[in-house]
Image (cartoon, rainbow, N blue to C red):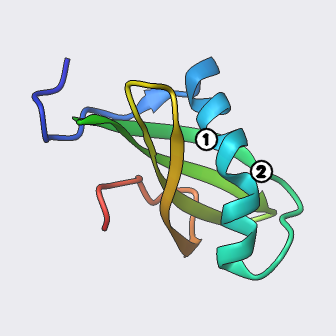
Amino acid sequence: MPMCGSTGSVKPVDDECRDVLGRVREGCEEKAGKKFEYFEPIHYKTQLVNGINFFIKVKIADNDYLHVRAHKSFQDEVTLWGIQQSKILEEEVHYFD
């Protein structure tokens, strides 16, 4: 288990990751200014804070990926914090503001 404040290792996609990502898709599309062809999680990392930060690599088109940062509170509220665009498959997701 990661220490509070640090990100853990890359994790395979699971139901919790899919749930968080599904709850922020609309916000991601708004920030990017377009609708996505795909919205498929590839892998993710978490950071334990006052809740859990999710850093998720997401396939949005052939050879086009996003990095998504979302926060899930201990009360199960999910908030989109940001996205990074124009990522490639080989680029591992990391912490970002």
Badge 2 density bin: few <14, some 14–19, many ≥20, Cα 10 Å: many
Q: Amino acid at mark 1?
A: Ile
For the point 63% across and 52% down, which residue is it?
58
The residue singled out by tag 1 in the image is 42
Q: Quadrant of residue 61?
A: bottom right
Placement of 77 over or under 59, stated as above or below: above
Q: Is residue 19 left or right of residue 46?
A: right
Q: Quadrant of residue 7?
A: top left
Q: Amino acid at mark 2?
A: Phe
Placement of 93 over or under 71, stated as above or below: below
Marker disc for residue 39: 2
For the point 83% across and 65% down, which residue is it?
36
Along the viewing direction, whichever of 18 and 93 lies nearer the viewer: 18
Mark 2 lies on a secondary structure that is loop
Q: Quadrant of residue 16?
A: top right
Instruction: Check if mark 1's residue and mark 2's residue have beta carbons within 8 Å.
Output: no
Give the Cα separation between the discs numbered 1 and 2.
10 Å
Along the viewing direction, whichever of 63 and 29 lies nearer the viewer: 29
Question: Residue 30, percent across and down?
Answer: 73, 73
Question: Residue 63, percent across and down?
Answer: 72, 66
Which of the image's four quarters has the N terminus?
top left
Question: Residue 48, percent across and down?
Answer: 24, 33
Mark 1 lies on a secondary structure that is strand
Q: Is residue 34 left or right of residue 73?
A: right
**Foreground: disc 1 or disc 2:** 2
Question: Residue 42, percent across and down?
Answer: 61, 41
Badge 1 density bin: few <14, some 14–19, many ≥20, Cα 10 Å: some
Q: Is residue 40 left or right of residue 77?
A: right
For the point 82% across and 77% down, which residue is it?
34
What number of labels is visible?
Answer: 2
